[in-house]
Image (cartoon, grey):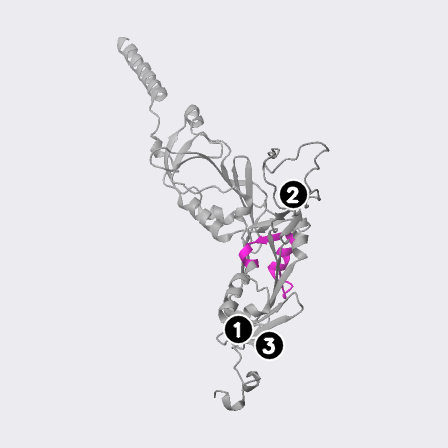
Amino acid sequence: MRLKTLALSVVVLAALAALAWYFRRPAPPLSADARIGQPLAERAVVEQAAKIRLRDQGRTVELARQADGTWRVGSYFDLPADFPKLTSFVAGLTGAKYQRLVTTNPGRIARLEFKDTEIALLDPAGKEQLALSLGKTAETGGGRFVRVGTEPKAYLADFSAWLDVEPKNWANPELLNLKAETVARIEIPFADGGTVVLSRTKKDDAWAAEKPADRKVRADRVTSLLGSVGNLRFSETSDPADAAVAAARANLHTVKLTTFDHQTITVAMGRKPEEKKLKPPAPAVPAGAPATGPSGNAPKADEPKKDGDNKAGGEAKPPAPEYETIPAGPVFAFVADSSASAPINALMAKRAFQVSDYAFTNLPSKPDELFEPPPPAKPDEKSAPADQTPAEKKP
């Protein structure tokens, strides 16, 4: 009987010991998490994503993949995305890896500053396939604290890419990228009604003037022109109905380029000109009030009078009018391609594009800028002085 009781006691004690071990067992080491060493985003997940959404400090950028594989900035007038920038960002996202699991403690997670900084990959229906929340940067060793969705885990990842949430910065700024060697003909009309036409038969040929035909072309000036007109990038966009855009259209300088394969591209640039505006006259001095000088103080009794002051009872000379200068407006570029299906034509219908001042100021303002100066006239007998006899003229 005693042996049976002893055996039962041993069994009970063993069961209690097993329960005690189970509830007091140590937590698995953090380094054992399955994500450690894995990329933040698998390339396959990125390749299947229809949209990429970035959020930070209350701002959002959304990029959408098109049926042809290109990307557009949905949050910036649906303009084409800057593909090299997007490629660089994706490379940083797929190249960064989870280094370690930092904590699962909610209190510690709260101190890692997870706010509204997020990266999300979405499917065509808008469902999140991957959502990452970014916390602060680690104080030692670098890297960024990361959470996956709403999981109660905080990781450290070697992710250092800057989250640019300015939508305009994700748009491709390139309007035109036309190689100079592909251009066969240049036509430039001028304000005085004249038109200069330059052409060449092959890309290595020298430029010749069709109009006017008796001038030698400055090759360096043409090269500079093609460099600025053929490579246009925008810095800002405006509503096509904006008043500044209308003012630019009223002051256009145009260059028409024709390539060897008969593609014609017309580039027109303009801006509101600088304006000098008459300042309003100074307020009249009330009768009986002492006259004041430029400093606002009444002139001294013994102060000599200047030219224009009242002389011998005559009337004072009226002051010269003063003008204020209103700076010229921004430069807008308007590009048209002879091919109706060219993407630039659709792009021009969306927004008005501001370009650098240099692109505009580098346009020739008069025909002479495109040609070598004419050789000096040679003296002849007809130009000899009247009092000089033919025998005295030098050979």
* Residue beneath disc 2: 309
Is residue 340 in the magenta section? Answer: yes
Instruction: Give residue 382's quadrant in the image.
Output: bottom right
Farthest-out residue, top: 2
Can you give x and y, in whole percent of width and height, for residue 363 in the image? Answer: 57, 62
Q: Are marks 1 and 2 in contact (CB under 8 Å)?
A: no
Going 47% across and 53% down the picture, which residue do you hit?
Answer: 84
Between 314 and 271, which is closer to the camera in this rendering? 314
N-terminal label among 1 and 3 = 3
Q: Which residue is painted at 33% across and 23% down in the image?
A: 25
Q: Determine if residue 114 is in view.
A: yes
Residue 282, picture quadrant: top right
Measured in 3D between alpha carbons, the distance from the residue under mark 1 to the one under mark 2, in whole angstroms, is 52 Å
The amino acid sitting under disc 3 is Glu
What residue appears at the point 33 percent right and 30 percent down from the top-left corner?
29
Is 391 located above or below residue 42 in the figure? below
Which of disc 3 and disc 2 is earlier in sequence? Answer: 3
| Dot 1 and dot 3 residues touching (CB under 8 Å) | no
* Residue 50 appears anywhere in the view: no
Q: Residues within 10 Å of mark 2 (few under 14, many from 20)?
A: some
Give the total of numbered labels: 3
Q: Residue at left 49%, top 68%?
A: 220
User: Which residue is labeled 3 in the image?
Assistant: 210
Residue range in magenta is 335-360
Q: Name the residue at the bottom extreme.
A: 391
User: Given the image, on which type of amino acid does mark 1 rest?
Assistant: Pro
Can you tell which mark lies on residue 373?
A: 1
